[in-house]
């Protein structure tokens, strides 16, 4: 199910990330597959590439380390996924002065020197 907001389409997962609600995100995960979401949900189930980018970038912009860890470590989301402008989550973290997010993304293997093209 997708919702429209400002001309963009979001899944409930995207809204949970956008609103910075880890508990809401976990509840959606638990009701999408089997209870205890770890390992039972994959990043592709969050929606298309645009939805995954929305979740990842929202977690970084909101400086939400728990949500970032869930997306990348538990749901195996590609932390290096690029938006239409070639930006990665690292670019988003640097834009918002999110030091902890930069550290976490680097620890997850994301290159700190990836150009945005």
Image (tube, helix red, strand yellow):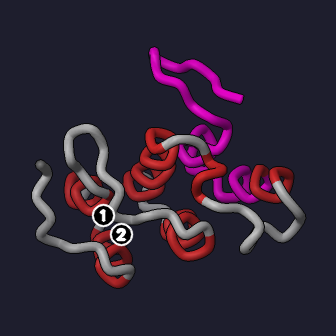
Give the residues in magenta: 1-27
Q: Is residue 24 magenta?
A: yes
Work out how far the residue at label 1 is from the one at label 2, CA to CA, in angstroms.
Answer: 5 Å
**SS of the residue at dot 1?**
loop
- Quarter of the image where one finds residue 37: bottom right
Q: Which residue is mark 2?
A: 101
Q: Position of residue 24 (x, y in %)?
A: 73, 50
Judge left or right: residue 37 versus residue 86.
right
- Image quadrant holding the N terminus, namely top right
In the image, which disc is placed on residue 98?
Answer: 1
Tag 2, which secondary structure? helix
Q: Which residue is the extreme one toward the top?
A: 7
Disc ID at residue 117: none
Above or below, 3 relative to 14? above
In the image, what residue occupies the spot 59% across and 53% down?
A: 44
Count residues near mark 2 (Cα–Cα under 10 Å), then give few for <14, some for 14-19, many for 20+. Answer: many
Residue 29: in magenta span: no
Is disc 1 in contact with disc 2, using a CB cutoff of under 8 Å? yes
Q: Residue at x 40, y 58 (%)?
A: 60
Q: Residue at x 56, y 48 (%)?
A: 17
Percent x, y of residue 80: 33, 63
Q: Position of residue 10 (x, y in %)?
A: 57, 31
Question: Along the horizontal axis of the image, is 87 left or right of 89?
Answer: left
Please state which of residues 60 and 56 is positioned toward the viewer in this rendering: 56
Q: Which one is in front, 19 or 50?
A: 50
- Near-viewer residue (64 or 15): 15
């Amino acid at each position: 199910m997708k919702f429209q907001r400002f001309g963009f389409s979001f899944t409930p997962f995207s809204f949970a990330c956008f609103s910075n609600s880890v508990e809401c995100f976990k509840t959606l995960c638990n009701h999408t597959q089997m209870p205890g979401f770890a390992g039972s949900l994959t990043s592709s189930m969050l929606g298309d590439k645009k939805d995954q980018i929305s979740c990842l970038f929202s977690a970084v912009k909101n400086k939400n380390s728990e949500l970032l860890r869930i997306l990348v470590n538990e749901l195996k989301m590609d932390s290096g996924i690029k938006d239409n402008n070639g930006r990665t989550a690292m670019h988003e973290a640097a834009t918002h002065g999110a030091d902890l997010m930069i550290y976490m993304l680097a620890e997850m293997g994301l290159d700190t020197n990836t150009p945005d093209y």
